[in-house]
Amino acid sequence: MNLTLMKAIVDLAVFCGVSEDNIVDPDAAVAQLEQLMFTLKQLTSDQIDEFIQYVQHLIVEESTASTNSDRQAFLLSFAENLGLITNGAS
């Protein structure tokens, strides 16, 4: 998969997932994340694995940097919350 597209997907999901209610309507955020979940489930298993590896790379990268803790917390549960993995396994 394209790294730029994966970054754009993750950044959009984080924005929807961690923005305050006065920034993004909560119902709209949930609807967008559900649509994203549906779309990502259309990927092949290899593409899902690659996407999960990318998210895991971001988690490690951002844990060593001084970044937003809400973003880090969101990323830690991102793949599981979107149904890409269950109980820690893809």
Image (spheres, rainbow, N blue to C red):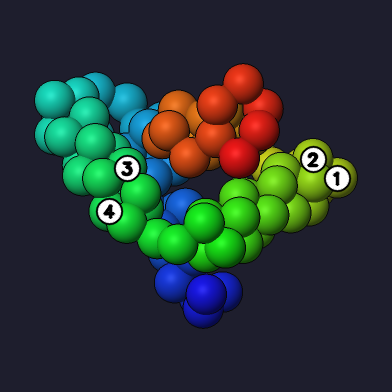
Q: Amino acid at mark 1?
A: Thr
Q: Is residue 32 left or right of residue 86?
A: left
Residue 7: x and y in percent read 51, 64
Q: Amino acid at mark 2?
A: Ser
Mark 2 to mark 1 CA distance (whole Å):
4 Å
Specify the quadrant of the image occupied by residue 18: top left
Q: Is residue 7 visible?
A: no
Q: Are marks 2 and 1 in contact (CB under 8 Å)?
A: yes
Residue 56: x and y in percent read 70, 47
Q: Are marks 1 and 4 in contact (CB under 8 Å)?
A: no
Mark 1 to mark 4 CA distance (whole Å):
31 Å
Q: Is residue 40 left or right of residue 80?
A: left
Mark 3 to mark 4 CA distance (whole Å):
5 Å
Q: Amino acid at mark 4?
A: Thr
Q: Is residue 25 left or right of residue 42?
A: left
Given this view, does label 4 or label 2 mark the residue nearer the observer?
4
Q: Which residue, given by chain and number where applicable, does mark 4 sit on?
A: 39
The tag earlier along the polypeptide, 3 or 2, is: 3
How packed mark 1 is, by other alpha carbons closer than 10 Å (few <14, some 14-19, many 20 or more), is few
Specify the quadrant of the image occupied by residue 23: top left
Q: Nearer the viewer, residue 68 or 13?
A: 13
Mark 3 to mark 2 CA distance (whole Å):
25 Å
Which numbered disc covers residue 37?
3
Instruction: Spot the residue most to the front.
Output: 45
Mark 3 to mark 1 CA distance (whole Å):
28 Å
Q: Nearer the viewer, residue 76 or 38?
A: 38
Which numbered disc covers residue 55?
none
Instruction: Spot the residue most to the right.
Output: 64
Q: Which residue, given by chain and number where applicable, does mark 2 sit on?
A: 63
Q: Residue at x 24, y 36 (%)?
A: 34
